[in-house]
Each structure stands twice: as C-alpha cells, then as structure tokens.
C-alpha cells in the first residue's frame, strides 16, 4: 500500500514539474477592472521560482458614493495551459482606505481604513515580445464596517516584462 501511495505522489509531482512555466523575473503594468466601480491599479509581479511569483497592486477605485485607495499583495502559482497560455491561482490580502461622498448618508465618518483577504484565479498570454496580457477573477472578503462581505473583482492586466 505504501508503494502505491508513493507512486501516486511521485506521479503527481512529476506532472506539476513537467507543466511548470518559466515566468519573467519582473513585470510592471496596469490592471483595469471592476470592483463595485471602475478601478485602475499599478501592478508589479516579481518571479520567485520557475512557477511562483508575488504580485503587488496599488490601486484607485471610484463609484457614485465613494473613492478608495487599495494596496494588495498576492502569492501566485503559475502553470502552462498550452504554448504561451498560462493559468494561475493565488492568495493574499491587502489594506484599503475609502472616502465617502457627502451625500452618502449611511456612514457618519468621512472615511474608513479596512483590511481584506483575497484569492485570485486567471489566465494569461505571454507574447514572444516582453508583453503579458491577463484576465483574472479576484474574490475579496473585507473586515471593516464599510466592507464586511464578499466582493468580486474581474480585471484585465497589461504588463511589460523585464
């Protein structure tokens, strides 16, 4: 029985290592998305290993009733789909500060700072030139008076690799 378990573990490890994608050491660009209002983020990715990286996003989100500044950090795992197509998943979190408009009467304060946990799943295309396009889905769970529920964010990323 131990030999069968060992063989299955070795086969799974070999499969993941065979699908590992060499990722760029650095990528810098923008992430444009919708997080309860249009948002723009400056995005930086730092490759750690052949198939792992860190992503940091500094963003501004705006809606009818508030503006928010956000800093997000994620650890991501990257796998090859086919050719230059990759898919990735990640987990992390961030901190945000939201400023409310005067006519938004549900909150007495002018603003609030809160933290949130985030997941990430996406697909990307790595061009032969140093350009990386991605589309990702990021569920976020906030911990604060303003954001204490699940928010869903979908975004398009355009990054220069170096």
Image: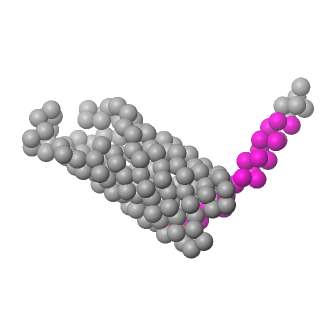
Q: Residue furthest bottom?
A: 129
Q: Nearer the viewer, residue 45 or 34?
A: 34
Q: In the rendered image of this protein, does residue 55 appear above or below residue 26?
A: above
Q: Residue furthest front?
A: 82
Residue 23 in the image: state x and y as whole percent.
Answer: 62, 62
Which residues fall within the magenta stretch?
A: 7-27
Horizontally, residue 12 falls left or right of residue 23, namely right
Which residue is pictured at 56% across the width and 46% down the height?
A: 89
Residue 49 in the image: state x and y as whole percent.
Answer: 64, 58
The verdict on residue 69 being magenta is no
Q: Nearer the viewer, residue 101 or 135?
A: 135
Colouring mode (rainbow / by chain / secondary structure / one colour): one colour
> Is residue 54 in view?
yes
Q: Residue furthest top?
A: 1
Residue 70 in the image: state x and y as whole percent.
Answer: 33, 50
Which residue is pictured at 65% across the width and 53% down the height?
A: 81
Horizontally, residue 103 falls left or right of residue 119, namely left
Which residue is pictured at 48% across the width and 53% down the height?
A: 135
Residue 35 in the image: state x and y as whole percent.
Answer: 33, 45
- Which quadrant does the N terminus fall into? top right
The verdict on residue 10 being magenta is yes
Which residue is pictured at 63% across the width and 62% down the height?
A: 84
């Amino acid at each position: 029985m131990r030999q069968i378990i060992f063989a299955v573990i070795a086969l799974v490890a070999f499969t993941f290592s065979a699908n590992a994608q060499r990722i760029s050491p650095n990528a810098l660009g923008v992430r444009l998305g919708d997080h309860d209002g249009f948002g723009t983020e400056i995005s930086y990715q730092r490759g750690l290993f052949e198939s792992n990286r860190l992503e940091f996003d500094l963003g501004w989100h705006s809606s009818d009733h508030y503006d928010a500044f956000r800093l997000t950090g994620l650890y991501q795992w990257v796998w090859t789909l086919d050719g230059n197509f990759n898919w990735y998943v990640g987990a992390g979190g961030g901190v945000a500060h939201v400023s409310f408009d005067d006519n938004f009467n549900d909150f007495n304060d002018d603003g609030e700072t809160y933290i949130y946990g985030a997941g990430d799943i996406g697909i990307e295309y790595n061009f032969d030139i140093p350009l990386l396009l991605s589309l990702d889905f990021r569920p976020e769970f906030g911990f604060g008076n303003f954001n204490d529920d699940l928010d869903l964010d979908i975004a398009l990323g355009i990054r220069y690799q170096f």
